[in-house]
């Protein structure tokens, strides 16, 4: 098992994607997800995932069941008011990235929980973003 990760929307969707035959569509994302000893799922990410799975309600129900099953490695993380404030601060500081609230809360959660590994497809934004008190800490992007 590897260390904890934070799941961003695109990374989580790719990790869960399946072919018509039931095989992983993106095995490298699935491997990163299943290797983590803890997977933090930010509340706003889950809402965004729900939007993308609006035509696949059974997949969303399955994901919710897995996230809230105490026997899994998932941990649902509601944004604290301080996370929302920090998300907006990061969005303003890195205005050229146009982070927005969801990606901003992923970064704020990384700071607060000191989990700097992010499962994401958004390499441009998360690769340029820096977190921490002095904005010097890079995020490790998975896979």
Image (cartoon, helix red, strand yellow):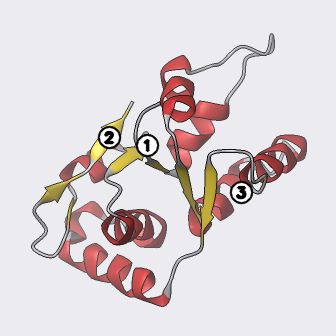
| Residue reaching furthest to the top | 21
| Residue reaching furthest to the right | 58
Q: What residue is disc 1 on?
A: 120
Give coordinates of residue 126: x percent, y percent. Answer: 30, 51
Q: Nearer the viewer, mark 2 or mark 3?
A: 2
Q: What residue is disc 3 on?
A: 51
Q: Dot 1: few (<14), some (14–19), or many (≥20) neighbours within 10 Å?
A: many
> Which of the pair 75/135 is nearer the observer?
75
Q: Are marks 2 and 1 in contact (CB under 8 Å)?
A: yes
Q: What residue is disc 2 on?
A: 141
Circle 2 SS class: strand
Instruction: Please say if 85 is above or below 1.
Output: below
Which numbered disc, 1 or 3, marks the residue that appears first in the sequence?
Answer: 3
Circle 1 SS class: loop
Q: Nearer the viewer, mark 1 or mark 3?
A: 1
Left or right of 89: which side holds 136?
left
Q: Which residue corresponds to the image point at 20% horizontal and 69% vertical from the top-left?
A: 94
> Which of the pair 47/115 is nearer the observer?
115
Q: Spatial distance from mark 2 to mark 1, Cα to Cα?
A: 7 Å
Which numbered disc, 2 or 1, marks the residue that appears first in the sequence?
Answer: 1
């Amino acid at each position: 098992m590897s260390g904890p990760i934070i799941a961003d929307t695109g990374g989580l969707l790719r990790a869960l994607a399946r072919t018509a035959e039931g095989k992983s569509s993106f095995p490298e994302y699935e491997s990163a997800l299943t290797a983590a000893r803890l997977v933090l799922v930010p509340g706003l990410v889950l809402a965004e995932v729900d939007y993308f799975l609006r035509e696949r309600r059974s997949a969303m129900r399955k994901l919710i069941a897995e996230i809230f099953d105490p026997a899994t490695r998932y941990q649902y993380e509601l944004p604290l008011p301080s996370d929302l404030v920090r998300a907006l601060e990061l969005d303003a500081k890195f205005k050229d990235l146009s982070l927005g609230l969801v990606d901003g809360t992923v970064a704020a959660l990384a700071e607060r929980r000191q989990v700097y590994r992010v499962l994401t497809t958004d390499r441009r934004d998360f690769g340029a973003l820096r977190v921490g008190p002095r904005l010097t800490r890079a995020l490790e992007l998975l896979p």
